[in-house]
Amino acid sequence: MAPTNSPRHDTIPSQPSFDGVDLDALAARLGTPLYAYSATAIRRRIGELQAALHGLDTTICYAVKANSNRAVLELMAAGGLGADIVSAGELQRALAAGIPAERIVFSGVGKTDSEIDMALEAGIDRFNVESLDELHAIERVAQARQAIACAAVRINPDVDALTHAKISTGRAENKFGVSIAEARRWFAERRQLAHVRLDGLHVHIGSQIMDVEPFRLALHRIAAFWRELVKAGHPIVSIDVGGGLGVRYRTGHDQPVAAADYAQAIREALADFDGRLLLEPGRWLVAEAGVLLTRVLRIKEGTERRFLVLDAAMNDLQRPSLYDAWHDILPVAPGLRPTTTYDVVGPVCETGDTFARERALPECAPGDLLAIQGAGAYGASMSSTYNSRPLAAEVMLDAGRYAVIRRRQTLEEMVAGEKSARDWQAVRPQEQA
């Protein structure tokens, strides 16, 4: 027997428009699934953070991995932001969007020699160094170029960010950064590096952090180490405090840290630091500025569950399947409708292709348009073509107008790099010298 729900006729919150654009008309014109971003909301977040940091010598470096679309990066460039990158591809995207190289920092545990070389050629601000092997690699590549690379050591302060385990980066068991003890040895031996100027500190303890205390604890540990280094004669010209500010994915539940409170924690911990501060916000700038529009394909009545099957899937938005993440889901059309409970799923052949379980929603019918909230960060940037599903289109909205910033991928474009196995070649061991 199909599950039953006691019908309640409620006026359900809806989202008929976004940044002055009618979402139903937009989806009818461009199809679904469709990512839509509000330029107004992104600019507002940039301004809010800049106002909170007023009076401090700061460089805000947007974490490109959150949403790497060129149009989004161009908004960051127009707002005076730099970029926090983790690959050569992100470097190229940032430069193409007009972000100056001198406002780019390179993070990540697996920088290759070729990526280091590209970054040096571009003239980026600095490298956030994650291991001794990486430090030696930067020295080697910089020497070959007869260049000087500026670098900061990423400290792992062993602070619990009180966030999801898969996005926690500041515990001793995480792969990121080095201990203060190891960093102390690096500075003691820094004069042996002829082509790396080690004069900065970096800390980033995780993402989607909803409490200011982990930030405060990490900042005070970094501040104490900075004072120790200066006392030992090691100049520190920059401290990168990372990112990680949480956002509201679940209305009435999530209580994000205010930008002003975050800035105050930085001011308190680093009150007497006279160098430059770098910040690496990503999610906080773009997550709530984006929605994923999707249509209901069908309602499936199971023996224990009622399934709402959408045309969006886990390949379009991975966060729910990857992190069991909550995203609010709203109907686009307003109105008084019975409320029922659904498991909201996509068409991909995986049980994990589930956006929500036992979610109370207005009664839906095939063709209804829904808006998955908080999809501006780690949505399109993490999407794939799994199940041979072409990548969704993306649009930028701005005060009643829209621009397509990535057209929907065609099947031909998706398979363009593939070919039949006809050009067979042998691989032989290299001859010994």
Image: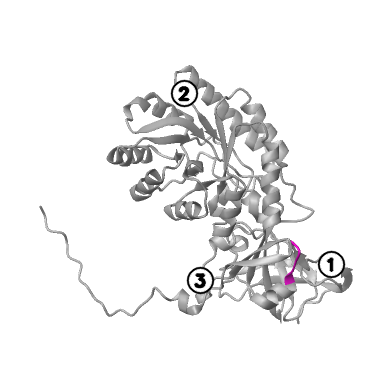
Quarter of the image where the N terminus is located: bottom right
Q: Is residue 209 above or below residue 302?
A: above
Of label 3 and label 2, which has the lower sequence position? 2
Q: Which residue is mark 3?
A: 385
Q: Residues within 10 Å of mark 2 (few under 14, many from 20)?
A: some
Can you tell which quarter of the image residue 160 is in? Answer: top right
Q: Position of residue 244 (x, y in %)?
A: 61, 45
Quick one: 250 or 45, which is closer to the camera? Answer: 45
Are circles 1 and 2 on residues that touch, CB within 8 Å?
no
Q: Look at the image and name its color scheme.
A: one colour
- Which numbered tag is attached to residue 12? 1
Can you tell which quarter of the image residue 307 is in? Answer: bottom right
In the image: residue 364, left or right of residue 294: right
Q: Is residue 85 above or below residue 67?
A: above
Q: Which residue is mark 2?
A: 235
Q: Residues within 10 Å of mark 1 (few under 14, many from 20)?
A: some
Are circles 3 and 2 on residues that touch, CB within 8 Å?
no
Q: Is residue 128 above or below residue 349?
A: above
Circle 2: residue type: Pro
Residue 216 shown in magenta: no
Residue bounds of the magenta highlight: 19-23
Q: Is residue 142 above or below residue 32?
A: above
Q: Residues within 10 Å of mark 3 (few under 14, many from 20)?
A: some
Circle 3: residue type: Thr
